[in-house]
Image: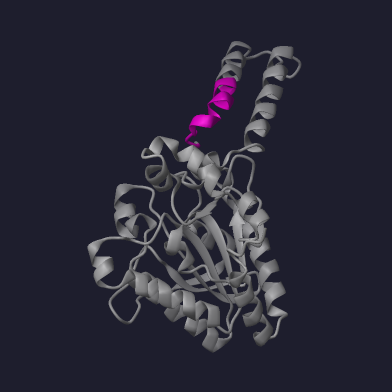
Amino acid sequence: MKIQPLEFEKPVLELEAKLEDIRKQLKGHDMDHDPEVKSIADSIEATRRDIYENLTAWQRVQIARHIQRPFFLDYVQHAFTDFVELHGDRLFGDDASMPAGLATIGDTRCIVIGQQKGRDVKENLLRNFGSPHPEGYRKALRLMRMAEKFGLPVVTLIDTPGAYPGVGAEERHIAEAIAVNLREMMLLKTPIVTVVIGEGGSGGALGIGVSDRVLMMENAYYSVISPEGCAAILWKHRKHAPEAAEALKIDAPSLLKLGLIDGIVKEPLGGAHHDYAASAESLKTAVLAALGEVSKLSTEKMLTQRYEKFRRMGVVSE
């Protein structure tokens, strides 16, 4: 799969193009000992590492939105087995932007819920660009209650720019659906582990994000508002999105330092879209470790820790 480059990756592409030209010129010759080839190859590796080991918050947002980044169903395919999708909220209908069902991760049977985007116009229309409707959150809650009934842990994978703000969603009470999920997830008597795999936008993300352990992929973001939305409010122009991203502290390292997430899931150099299998293996390992920790707790202690975890957020001392 040919990876579509981002703007800040162009220095690497230029060096790779230069190396390819030299290789064509030296075709049929022994290139391994050619000093120019070796020098450029070393420069490519050094430049790549310099870029990806010093990413800004805005660059991580761009990677999180990359069209070739693995989505929810890609992680289900690579990190889970025996997935059986379940449909409908038993009130209005099904929401294709919030697929969910039974699955197995490692040796653990669980309920897995996530938000799914599309890679082309047809799929994006089906998945509503990853922005769930009220019935998506109600379906998620229905399956969480089923997990509680049968003693199964819940794994949620967040990847949404935000819940759908359209007229239909408002008519069917999108805010109420999310609010009920926040309340009920806080009280759910079964372990819950969440991973932000791409975009973690506002209440749309939090509607399936009240968990015992909240993890983030290395190049995901988690925020109450998008950088563009913040820039439009504070600077009156979207061009200030990079500054907004820095100010919002929406990247995984910043959120871990602030205590708003519990861990970071390592991605391959360049982002998860460079190696689906390796990214899924990292996610699987992190989820199983988190489930192992939480499963050792009594139900009472698990619920107390979950409650205290979220009550600590936003408390500031000077």
Which contiguous range is marked in magenta?
Answer: 3-16
Membership of 6 in magenta stretch = yes
Report if residue 86 is visible in the image: no
Point out residue 252 in the picture as x, y percentages from the top left corner.
61, 52
Camera-side residue of 46 and 279: 46
Report if residue 46 is visible in the image: yes
Q: Residue furthest front?
A: 318
Point out residue 50 in the picture as x, y percentages from the top left corner.
67, 31
Q: Residue furthest top?
A: 25
Image: 50 above or below 318: above
**Residue at 45% across / 69% down in the picture?**
207
How are the colours assigned in the image?
one colour
Q: Residue furthest right?
A: 33
Q: Quadrant of residue 103?
A: bottom right
Q: Main secondary structure of the magenta part?
A: helix
Instruction: Report the side of 298 relative to 10 (left or right).
Output: right
Point out residue 215 in the picture as x, y percentages from the top left corner.
61, 61
Instruction: Report the side of 31 relative to 125 (left or right).
Output: right
Image: 33 above or below 200: above
Point out residue 41 in the picture as x, y percentages from the top left corner.
68, 23
**Residue at 47% across / 43% down in the picture?**
66
Which quadrant does the C terminus fall into?
Answer: bottom right
Membership of 312 in magenta stretch = no
Q: Quadrant of residue 311?
A: bottom right
**Residue at 42% across / 63% down in the picture?**
204
Q: Quadrant of residue 43?
A: top right
